[in-house]
Amino acid sequence: MRPRWRKVLSDLIDNKARTILVVFSIAVGIFAIGVIAGAYVIISEDMGLSYAANNPSNIEIRMDDFDQDLLNTIRNFEGIKEAEARRVFNLKVRIPGETQWITVDVVSMKNFDENKINLLQPVTGGAAPEKNQILLERDVLEELNISPGENLEIQLRDETIKEIIVAGIVMDSSTGAIDFLAPPLAYITSDTLKFFAEPDQFNRIFATVETGQDDDEHIRSVIADLTDKIEKNDYGIGRTFRSKTHEHPLEPTINAVLGILMVLGVLIVFLSSSLIANTLSALLNQHLRHIGVMKLIGGQNQIIFRMYLVQLLVFGFLALLIAIPAGGQGAYWLAQYIADEMGFSLLGYRIVPLSFALQLAVGILVPLVSGFIPVINGSKVTVQKALDGDRVRRSSGEDSEGKEEGSRFEEIQVKTTRALADRGIRIPRQMLISLRNTFRQRGRLMLTLFTLTMGGAIFVSVFNVRDTLHTYVDNIGNYFMADVTLDFERPYRLEEIKQYAYQDPRVTHVEGWSYASAEILFPDGSTAENISILAPPGGSDLVSPMMIEGRWIQAGDVKKLTVAEGIYDYYPNLEVGDTIPLKINGKEEYWEVVGLFKFIGLEGVIGYAPYEYISREQNLANRSFSYRIEIQEHDLASQEVMAKDLDAYFRAQGFRVQEATPGLSTLDSAAESLDILITFLLIMALLTATVGSMGLAGTMSMNVLERTREIGIMRAIGATDLEIIRMVIVEGLLIGLLSFGLGIILAVPFTYLLSNIVSDAVFATPIAVVFTPAGYLIWLGLVIILSSLASVLPARNAARLTIREVLAYE
Amino acid sequence: MTDFQSPLIELRGVVKNYVTKAGSFPALQGIDLDIYRGEFLGVIGKSGAGKSTLLNMITGVDQISAGQVRAHTNGTSVNLDQLSENELTLWRGRNLGVIYQSFQLLPMLTLAQNVMMPMDLSGFYHPRKSKERALELLNMVELGEHIDKYPSEISGGQQQRVAIARALANDPPLLVADEPTGSLDSVTADHIFKLFQRLLDDNRTIIMVTHDQGLLPRFSRYIQIADGQLVGEGIEL
């Protein structure tokens, strides 16, 4: 090997710690990019394919009970390719002997073998249930530990408890995809309906369209025509859903979340480049003498430049060796995790060419770009500067600007110290040295501060975003303030239910609510979107809306509603006082919008109208199917106990209870979905913090290394090991705390930016930003620990050297 | 044998000023000097007199503030102050060997690799040839048995001999030595001077900077510098 390459190799091998530091800092960025880009591609490809492979319905209609005749009519309807009818009802199930019931939506089908829409994929056990058997969707396993062949206990509406055999576990990526807050699913054949005391009738239509399966507009128009037809046949329609064949309903949301992670990944690459630039500047600084010697004996600029360029490429290559396999695995792991959560399957592990190419480009370009300036400066240095180092710069006056700045800082330091001393405050000498040392290498300090500050700002922002999202979900909870929702199979008088409910001393408030389903129409009469109109009594205590404009509903309102801002998707210029056409109870009417409020955009459009009006229109005045109950304790545990007790109590009194649900359960599952997102954001935040602390560790070791001789002199004149260590640690802490100060300022715009992007992706609406001290305090603790750790090792190494070794150091 | 007819290096009115916070500091104040082929020139002076600065002007390591340094080597004549940094590097690689008091060996390379490095950087020798030549040179400085050792594994005197071997790698006509024996004991220093004598016999030119007046008898000619000026000159026989 030629001596020049032997030198490059020796530089890489001899200082393993530095090589590892640089390689890992590049690898972290490549890894992050690889994971996110890989997962993005895998999910984009597999989510749509996996979803389409099960022939998902383009249209789902929830409606009154119907029979085969109507199904045949729908099958023959123009624009419909395939249509299947099912009965869906909810039920409580549990493992025999256990106390915890969970609610599932049971789907009955005529014939599993002939099923063509929303296909099921077998996971374990049988793929189709026999008579009086049940299939479970794998989501059920998250709450119940049960296997095929085992018995499941079910509670019928009349409280009868029966046992049924679990035939198998299946995956249904279509039926539940559209409504991720819905309970998990179970499947039976139609001839098992009798076992569940359910009528042998359908209540849902699942259909695909003949053409334009990925054309939202076309599907919408087919639905409008089809619902017209159904309503003309005197069937009431509850709600309609539409989805494209090749796009999972949640794909835009997941892509948006992955987009956010990608932005953070790019930021990590950016931070690691500043770390590389810092390390390489220090490396070239340490190699100045070598460069000088090489130039003295005939090494031209371009030769020196090439030598260090190769070194950069080796750094990149080594980082790629680590990051490409790890990134590939990480990408698949992330995609698998998302697939599991969202209920679709992946096509299998594979190398994603785009991700590979990106990693390769980052691995080569990042060290080259970030190291280019240090290397070009290093190779251009004159022999004399290189051989004499700092001594020449100071004596020749060529670095006069920096020197003056340094002097100015020293002057300020001296003046401050004197002023403090006059007031009897003495700063220890070692502390003064630490302070001065911190600002000696200003370029290096800036890059380290930048890396650590960015890491800290992202870390703190993620905590703020987490609280922002949770606060928003809590605020959404203000629309569902009831502790228990008690639904009946038939309407009961308000006074009657209240009288019974108040028998329990825990019950503090009872309200009867009504509900109406309607369609928002465009001015031309075509259907824009479904709207669920909730009808609490005017002046209800159980709704505390986040109003954007206008007012909340009042008891005397007639054909007036407040509507969620999701309406802007269809009426972008809507203002309070405007009227919008609605199709309600089969009639087209104009309703006045009296207020607009914030809600989760992805959950469709909801509106509120007073119970007093809706119940009268439904001929249910002073009666209701659904009651909202407030109790003394508002935690989920109390709500669950109360729901169970009320369920049992009302059944015992002869009421036909359909379901009693605790208020926080739905919110909890929404919060869980958010926690997945927050977990990913936190992982990214930790990666940035890691890069930041690696930067600090590198800087501290370089600072100490460059001052080895100085440390030797200090020890020679009496400084103890402890004093040396303390000086270095104080310097590290000072940098850490400076970055903390800057980080908390930078965290403010970061929090706003990140919150807006995330809320837009998750809630489809901007939300109010919340700042929490948690992130600041954790980061402060981390910064103190990281700064101390980053300084301890170099400080100990410096303290361990003998005076002779240190003074002989070059 | 010294050829006093044609100088190898000519210095005319060489001035070097350093700018410090306290003002301009003249390190060299109009030096006129001719250095001839085959001579062993001693540059004598106290610490801070300007000896090393003068050497830096001759090697092109530092830029002159005024005046001219002209070199006539390998059949060409050049003004060093008109060469770019890269051209100076090339010129040094071909014409000059430099030896420092602190040896300036690259610690991560073996002795052989250190000697091969100038040949590798200048490209004057094929890699295989350069290894043979490095062995020859190390044998000449009596270190043939230590070629695979690292600088840290040998003594100071031995390191200086490696530095001499390295300085000779590209077969330059001129060797420049800055206090080469400054950190060596008298026996080892004697060894280095014997080596210099062999090089002089081989018709090379050596310029050596020292503060040690006792070394005067070693030189064929010497100049004395004080406060950046030539204050004396002499010939030892």
Image (spheres, grey):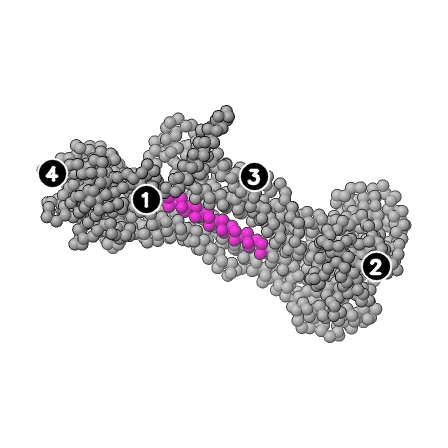
Residue under label 2: A558
Q: Main SS type for the magenta part?
A: helix
Q: Amino acid at mark 3?
A: Leu
Magenta segment: does it hold A236?
Answer: no
Q: Residues within 10 Å of mark 2 (few under 14, many from 20)?
A: some
Q: Amino acid at mark 2?
A: Val
Q: Are marks 4 and 1 on the same chain?
A: no
Q: Amino acid at mark 4?
A: Ile
Q: Residues within 10 Å of mark 3 (few under 14, many from 20)?
A: many
Relative depth, front residue between B173 and A315: B173
Chain letter of disc 2 in the image: A
Q: Which x, y percent locates residue A117?
A: 70, 67
Q: Which x, y percent locates residue A766?
A: 65, 53
Residue under label 4: B235
Which label belongs to residue A780?
3
Which label belongs to residue A386?
1
Chain letter of disc 4 in the image: B
Q: Which x, y percent locates residue B102?
A: 27, 38
Q: CA distance from mark 4 to mark 1?
A: 35 Å
Chain letter of disc 3 in the image: A
Q: Residue at x 17, y 47 (%)?
A: B10
Name the mark nearer the viewer: 2 or 3. Answer: 2
Locate residue A723 relative to residue A466 in the image: left or right.
left
Magenta-colored span? A258-286
Q: Earlier in the sequence, mark 2 or mark 3?
A: 2
Q: Secondary structure at mark 2?
A: loop
Q: Secondary structure at mark 3?
A: helix
Asked if labels 1 and 3 touch by Cβ distance under 8 angstroms, the answer is no
